[in-house]
């Protein structure tokens, strides 16, 4: 009986930890229209977290280059573009990295966390001002 209880506790704990994992596929939601825009794959590379656009729902935008992006990202295809860069774990948040909006080329400081509801809170900052989106996990 004790083994069964321990196994159940371990399984429940394992699922809750996995549910809070930031890595994986996330559906981006437009904060103004509420419409799904794309799928971003969040992955770890060299100890840091990055996010790449792997799917764009609007067929007319799938093949567009990032003409407003700066630096190495200028004119790269938006599909496949790393929009989240160099995030590191800092307590319960992922911080110290950036996110770029491929529509306007603006880069923002970024903070990420998985909410209790299982959504990814994506908060971009310029100074003290911020904007927040909530992305949905893709199974």
Image (cartoon, helix red, strand yellow):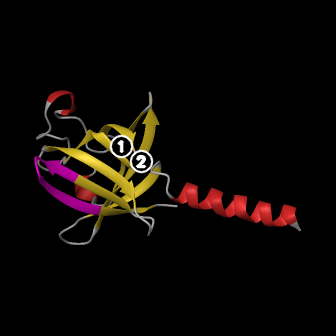
Q: Which segment is the magenta one?
A: 124-133
The answer to whether residue 135 is magenta is no
Is residue 83 among what the camera can see?
A: no
Q: Splitting the image into 4 quarters, where does residue 135 fall?
A: bottom left
- Residue labelled with disc 1: 52
Quote the CA–CA distance across marks 2 and 1.
5 Å
Which one is in front, 135 or 16? 16
**Picture residue at 36% right of the left edge, 43% below the top:** 51
- Confirm or deny contact between disc 2 and disc 1 (CB under 8 A): yes
Q: Residue furthest right?
A: 1
**Could you tell me residue 71's position as x and y percent?**
15, 28
Which of the numbered marks, if any, corresponds to residue 1? Answer: none
Q: Which residue in the protein does label 2 denote?
A: 41
On the image, the x and y values in percent for residue 75 come to: 17, 35
Q: Residue furthest bottom?
A: 34
- Circle 1 packing at 10 Å, graded few (<14), some (14-19), many (20+), is some
């Amino acid at each position: 009986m004790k083994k069964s209880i321990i196994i159940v506790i371990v399984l429940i704990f394992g699922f809750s930890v996995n549910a809070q994992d930031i890595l994986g596929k996330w559906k981006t939601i437009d904060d103004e229209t509420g419409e799904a825009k794309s799928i971003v794959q969040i992955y770890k590379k060299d100890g840091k977290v990055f996010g790449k656009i792997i799917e764009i729902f609007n067929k007319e935008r799938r093949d567009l280059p990032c003409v407003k992006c700066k630096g190495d990202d200028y004119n790269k295809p938006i599909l496949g573009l790393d929009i989240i860069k160099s995030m590191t774990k800092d307590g319960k948040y992922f911080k110290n990295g950036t996110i770029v909006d491929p529509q306007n080329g603006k880069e923002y400081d970024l903070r990420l966390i998985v909410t209790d509801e299982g959504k990814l809170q994506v908060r971009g900052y310029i100074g003290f001002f911020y904007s927040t989106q909530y992305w949905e996990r893709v199974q």
